[in-house]
Amino acid sequence: TSGVLDFFEYVKNPFVSVNYDTGNSAYWNFDQLNEISNYSHLIGNIHIKDCTPELYSVPLGKGNVDFPAVFKLLKLKGYKKHFILQTARGENDINVAKEYYEFITPLINELNNESRT
């Protein structure tokens, strides 16, 4: 995490941002909540992917990404930018895309709902 912050301190360019990949962090066994806590302000877009340290790409919800916790933290940090589905393929890509859309949509909707406290 400090390497990312050091790099952006060196670059100091508002047109350069982090392309955060949930699956890559899971694959490399990084602490996603720590990463997001430390540099969410630098994230320009997020690849939605699920992985395990053994398998580089698995269906959403079948790997090590804790999507509810990630999205809860993104909401807390005020993330309002782009998401890109970069997911495992299936036998019928259209059906799989629909399944992933249905998986992620409630999380994105909750992210966009303002807290009513």
Image (cartoon, helix red, strand yellow):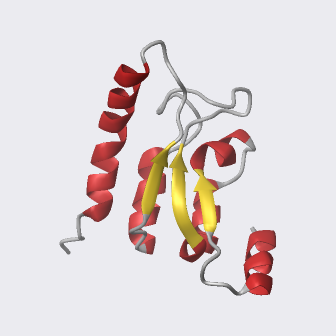
In the picture, the quarter occupied by the N terminus is: bottom right
Q: Residue at the far top: name it.
A: 91
Is 76 left, or right, of 42 in this rendering?
A: left
- Nearer-the-camera pick, 101 or 77: 101
Quadrant hosting residue 103 = top left
> Where residue 59 sits in the image (x, y, percent)?
51, 27
In the picture, the quarter occupied by the C terminus is: bottom left
**In the image, residue 92 above or below residue 34:** above
Quadrant hosting residue 102 = top left
> Where residue 36 sits in the image (x, y, percent)?
58, 65
| Residue at figure coordinates x 39%, y 33% from the top left | 100
**In the image, residue 28 above or below residue 81:** above
| Residue at figure coordinates x 61%, y 42% from the top left | 23
> Where residue 83 sits in the image (x, y, percent)?
45, 54
| Residue at figure coordinates x 67%, y 48% from the top left | 25
> Where residue 75 sits in the image (x, y, percent)?
38, 66
| Residue at figure coordinates x 52%, y 28% from the top left | 62
**In the image, residue 62 above or below residue 32:** above
Is 2 left, or right, of 65 in this rendering?
A: right
